[in-house]
């Protein structure tokens, strides 16, 4: 499969974060990005499906490894961190074809595991960056955390535009700060048995929900939001 929005889309994100753009200017830059499309369907000798054997895992890996940047029409503007973490069975709450923009507090940043989506590489630069967001920095139990992930392909697109999205750089820049992030919604069925919303009360649960933003396509530091008391 081929995706059309690539390298120069990262420039768009940079401009939006630093100087801001009008919608007209944004569309103009996106058009330019499309005309300079590249192909990362195979990256570091690893295809979109990774090296998974089972077809269902291959399909999950293709979603994880998307490297097209969402357009305005892709965003479900009703999605918030509050609604993602809201208790209750949530496997069909959203769609993996939707993009989201949410605000949260960065509780943790660390390298992702050795996974089939990245062909089980042990190279940290070629693995996902695992970021955990919470609604309240004073409430950080595992059941309150939402996982978002930066992927190697998106990291490369950023790096091509002199934006360092290595795990170390992301940790240094965003840990302990409030951020606004954008990216694709993704329901990670491999972890639904370890999430409070789908398997409530299990001792081994380490996350609030199996829903993620994966891949993340934009990160921006923001002020702490004002929430109802």
Image: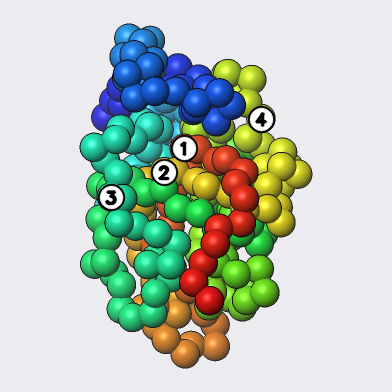
Q: Which residue is drawn at 53% across and 76% down?
A: 229
Residue identified by numbered label 2: 183
Q: Do the residues labelled 2 and 1 touch (CB within 8 Å)?
A: yes
Q: Are marks 1 and 3 in contact (CB under 8 Å)?
A: no
44 left or right of 100?
A: right
x, y percent for residue 157: 51, 25
Residue identified by numbered label 1: 217
163 left or right of 168?
A: left
Q: Which mark is residue 76?
A: 3
Q: Which of marks 2 and 3 is nearer the N terminus?
A: 3
Q: Earlier in the sequence, mark 4 or mark 2?
A: 4
Instruction: Tell me the CA gap for discs 2 and 1.
Output: 5 Å
Q: Nearer the viewer, residue 199 or 16?
A: 16
Q: Which mark is residue 164?
A: 4
Instruction: Tell me the CA gap for discs 2 and 3.
Output: 11 Å
Answer yes or no: is residue 123 visible: no
x, y percent for residue 19: 56, 23
Mark 2 or 3, which is nearer the eye?
A: 3
Mark 1 or 3, which is nearer the eye?
A: 3
85 left or right of 91?
A: right
Q: What element carries label 2?
A: strand
Instruction: Tell me the CA gap for discs 4 and 3.
Output: 28 Å
x, y percent for residue 182: 44, 43
């Amino acid at each position: 499969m081929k995706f059309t929005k690539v390298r120069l889309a990262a420039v768009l994100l940079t401009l939006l974060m630093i100087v801001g753009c009008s919608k007209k200017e944004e569309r103009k830059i996106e058009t330019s990005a499309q005309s300079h499309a590249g192909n990362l369907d195979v990256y570091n000798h690893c295809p979109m499906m990774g090296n998974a054997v089972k077809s269902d895992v291959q399909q999950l890996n293709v979603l994880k490894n998307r490297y097209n940047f969402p357009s305005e029409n892709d965003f479900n503007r009703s999605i918030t961190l509050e609604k993602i973490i809201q208790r209750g069975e949530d496997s069909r709450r959203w769609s993996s074809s939707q993009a989201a923009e949410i605000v949260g507090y960065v509780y943790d940043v660390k390298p992702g595991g050795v996974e089939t989506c990245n062909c089980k590489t042990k190279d940290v630069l070629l693995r996902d960056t695992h970021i955990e967001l919470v609604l309240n920095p004073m409430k950080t139990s595992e059941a309150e955390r939402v996982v978002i992930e930066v992927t190697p392909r998106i990291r490369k697109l950023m790096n091509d535009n002199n934006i360092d999205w290595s795990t170390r750089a992301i940790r240094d820049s965003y840990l302990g700060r409030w951020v606004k992030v954008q990216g694709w919604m993704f329901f990670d069925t491999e972890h639904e048995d370890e999430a409070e919303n789908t398997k409530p009360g299990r001792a081994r649960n380490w996350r609030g929900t199996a829903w993620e933003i994966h891949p993340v396509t934009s990160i921006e530091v923001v002020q702490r939001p004002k929430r109802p008391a």
